[in-house]
Amino acid sequence: MVADPGKELGMRIIALDVHRSFAQMAILEKGKIRDAGRIDLEHGRLLQFATKLKPDDEIVIEATGNTSAIVRLLSPFVGRVVIANPILVRAIAWAKVKTDKIDAAVLAKLHASGFLPEVWMPDEETETRRRVVAERTQLVCQMTRLKNRIHSVLHANLIPPYKGTLFSKRGRAWLEAQPLAEDQRRVVLRHAGELDRLGGELAQVDKSLAKTALQEPRVKRLMTITGVDVTVALSIVAAVGDIERSHRRKSSSATSDSTRGSGSPVTSRPTMAASPNKAEPTRDRCWSRRRGSFPVCLVRCAPSSCASVALGRPT
């Protein structure tokens, strides 16, 4: 791989192979690459390292769980922070022998040669929306699990289903009157109390989402689609982020928090295509792996009528 001499001579390229608690560094300067040791991924240590950087330096980092925090901390001190797609990096520069030093050096060389596949990093507002949507999803999952456990206790004791809304004031009174063992009654009432607490938190999250929706014209536009409410519209906006970037880049589907590290073990599970143009071959490969009666069953059991919502990049 031949690097771009002008790019190397004009700046330093500092590549970070990020792990949970440390990052392995490699510096490419004046055509030579050298190992720069490790740095602890703590706020104070990383800020101390950032003060030693030059304004024309470029940082290369793979997308992982703590990428956004590192990028926001280092961005004011350098010329640019580049986020690499680890899945495509592994496909381009696959190596039988992998070490932290080799991975960091590969990132620096790929960026210097112009072959580094980059991903888009969402802004703080988009990340906040994603966190709120994820928080709501977790609350709903917890409440669903608790409701299922209550239903399982009633079913195990041959108690017929309640004709009405079980998780209401009348339903609570009906639960307390059921002939259950003392330990099972305690479990049911504890889960019912936990549902009340989680329901209050869910109401606060929904209120916050509703306030955000009033200030976002894209949410109002999505809500004109039948079946799309505030939560669904905000989830779409949070997942897509800045749709205008599709005019500036070839791909709008790869983001910094939707990819895994290149050092992660690779399984045969199909992954999302990094570009809309690659979605069709990826789908064909996934379909070809499942031969036999299962694909035929899917076609036969497909609903005759359904509502579909498609989001596409404007051409």
Image (cartoon, helix red, strand yellow):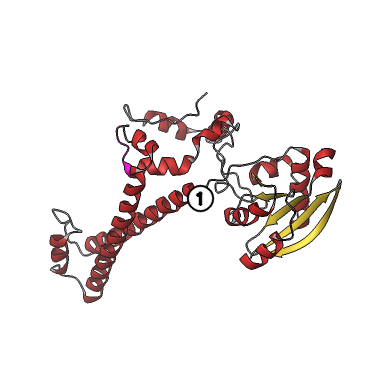
- Residue 110 horizontal side relative to residue 205, left or right: right
Quarter of the image with the N terminus is top right
Residue stretch in magenta = 226-230
Please, what is the dominant secondary structure of the magenta stretch?
loop
- Residue 271 horizontal side relative to residue 230, left or right: right
- Name which quarter of the figure residue 213 lies in: top left
Residue 55: x and y, percent? 72, 51
Q: How crowded is mark 1: few (under 14 residues within 10 Å), some or many (20 or more)?
A: few
Outermost residue toward the top?
A: 315
Instruction: Judge whether residue 227 can be spotted in this image.
Output: yes
Residue 240: x and y, percent? 48, 39
Please tell me whether residue 69 belongs to the stretch shown in magenta. no
Please tell me whether residue 228 belongs to the stretch shown in magenta. yes
SS under mark 1:
helix
Instruction: Judge whether residue 291 can be spotted in this image.
Output: no
Residue 160: x and y, percent? 16, 57
Residue 297: x and y, percent? 41, 32
**Which residue occupies 79% across, 49% down?**
12
Relative to 210, residue 45 above or below: below
Check disc 1 and report the residue beneath it.
124
- Residue 183 horizontal side relative to residue 52, left or right: left
**Which residue occupies 75% across, 57% down?**
25
Q: How many badges with numbers are in the image?
A: 1
Q: Nearer the viewer, residue 163 or 194?
A: 194
**Which residue occupies 30% across, 52% down?**
207
Outermost residue toward the bottom?
A: 182
Q: Which amino acid does label 1 sit on?
A: Glu
**Which residue occupies 42% across, 52% down?**
134
